[in-house]
Amino acid sequence: MIDPRDLAVATAGLTKRFGEQVAVDGIDLAVPYGAVYGFLGPNGSGKTTTIRLLLGLAGATAGEIAVLGEPMPDRGREVLPRVGALVEGPAFYPYLSGAANLARFDAANPASDPATRRTRVVESLDRVGLTAAARKKTKAYSLGMKQRLGIAVALLRPRELLVLDEPTNGLDPQGTREIRALVRSLAAHGSTVLMSSHLLAEVEQICTHVGVMSRGRLVEQGTLEEFRGRAEAQFVVRSPDPAEAVRVLVGLGLATETTGDVVAGSVDGRPLPPAEDVVAALVAAGVRVRGFAVERPSLEDRFVALTGEGFEVPR
Amino acid sequence: MTALLTSELRTLFRRRRTWAMLTVLAAAPVLLAVALWLSGDEPAPGEGPPFFDRITQSGLFVSVAALALSIPFFLPVTVAVVAGDSLAGEASLGTLRYLLVAPAGRSRLLLVKAVAALAFAVAGIGTILVVGAGLGTVLFGVGPVPTLSGSTLGVAGSSGRIALVGLYALVSLLGLMAVGILVSTLTDVPVGAMAATVIAAIASQILGSIPQLDWLHPWLPTRYWFGFADMLRDPIAWGQLQDSLVLQLGYVAVLGSLAWARFTTKDVLS
């Protein structure tokens, strides 16, 4: 159990209904300070709605929200200046330049110092690699440039919390790497990051915590290790003597499945026996082992297991 | 507050559309003055648009005649575009969510949008008056002008009266701005909000022209739109300006409260 005071974002029973439809269904989000929290879920699972509720853009039907220890949306005026956000894609005034757009959003923040605005805009553009395009009107920006500029808005001031809704959407591989590096450096400097994504590889690389949404519910939440650990691991033995291998594995209390010369051994619920004991047993029984591996299902397998397969948008 | 307002005005006046609308408004005095100057005839008293016949005595009055031409349609349309676009435009661009998480504050943003609409109306009316007076002076010169009551006004007096006419026009547009901003809080489609506001202005003028609906007339926002001639009497007849101010502020209070109630509680999902 985590102490709510250690949480940068905490919700209790957070619910949002649109008429009959329940978009967010009683979720208890817990994002510890300093975490890089990967907020996962298929399209339409309620991630963006949750983010809107956290930032006070939409009102909750029920439940409570605390961001940086303050209740939202009541304390938005105090909390939001400390939060940088990218919500459902970037948005700009197409007839203004990149720099003018940043200055506009900065001017909307009563906690921003106008004296340092110009410098902060320049620095922010530099951090996302848009210095060369600063004077260009944003209608001439590519999708990736807009995404970068959106992140630049979030970086206009030092932030304690960054809420980034699909930050690498529309970016090329280089851009994706840069954003990943940026998120890591933000976290290294003590910011908490709540990042929604459906790119599991990305989450696996930079997140410390994971929460999975499915049909408006938070179906799983915890550290990345816990999340991985909950996935059932198995031994995979490659051998020209599959029948022998099966006998040994069954002898060790494992359930097996044979496909050609590959034997997979798993246990249900209990921890696996140490791998070295299994190898020793196989060798002692004279099984010719050509390959041995401990395999965990990928994050993707785990994700699909939690959220279901297929293209269908829930309700 | 001031930073957000400065930014709002800068954004408004950096937009090409704003300048296009001011150009259209400037065209009214230009057309009027040039047409009269080219024809060379002196209009008979009462001929043409209101105050048309005074232009040849003092070119300053091009401004008042042009304003009289613009009040029924051009001015309300441009004001409706700015007021109707105010929040719906931000919503459709998606910039509204970024202003709110900045955090601009909903009440503050609404107030800033209202002030920006007012600033645009001042700019629009000012454009007509300044262009009209300037061009009129060049083409017709300035001279003493008889007021509607028969006394005579000098150049300084005329300029003061023209400014009062501008103020009268500004007051009469307050209610329409409130309509525009209210509609703008109700939709994410700026064109719809603009159209609805224009329709409100036109419908009110039509209703105002139907004598069988005279019970309704005191409540119409366009009720005093054409009373600005009172500013050109001697002494100035303040009655209609006062009534207009009360009516318009009533609209601002009622529609402004509705807009505030709506905007401060609405889910921003755009």
Image (cartoon, rainbow, N blue to C red):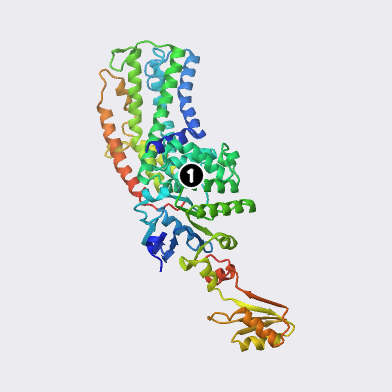
Q: Residue A9 at x, y = what percent?
A: 42, 59
The chain carrying label 1 is A
Tell me the kind of residue under disc 1.
Leu
Residue closest to the eye, B220 or A187: A187
Q: Considering the image in quadrants, where does the N terminus of chain A appear?
A: bottom left
What residue is rendered at 45% in x and 61% in y?
A31
Judge from the rendering whether residue B229 lies leftward or rightward of residue B70; answer left or right. Answer: left
Q: Residue B193 at x, y = what percent?
A: 43, 44
Q: Residue A279 at x, y = what percent?
A: 66, 81
Q: Residues within 10 Å of mark 1 (few under 14, many from 20)?
A: many
Q: Vertically, is B138 above or below B3?
A: above
Residue closest to the eye, A218 or A70: A70
Quadrant of residue B56 in the image? top left
What residue is rendered at 26% in x and 34% in y?
B246
Q: Residue A122 at x, y = what percent?
A: 53, 39
What residue is rendered at 59% in x and 70% in y?
A301
Q: Check disc 1 and report its element: helix, strand or loop.
A: loop
Residue closest to the eye, B205 or A251: A251
Q: How many marks?
A: 1
Quadrant of residue B122 in the image? top left
Res B120 seen here: yes
Q: Give the residue at mark 1.
A: A156
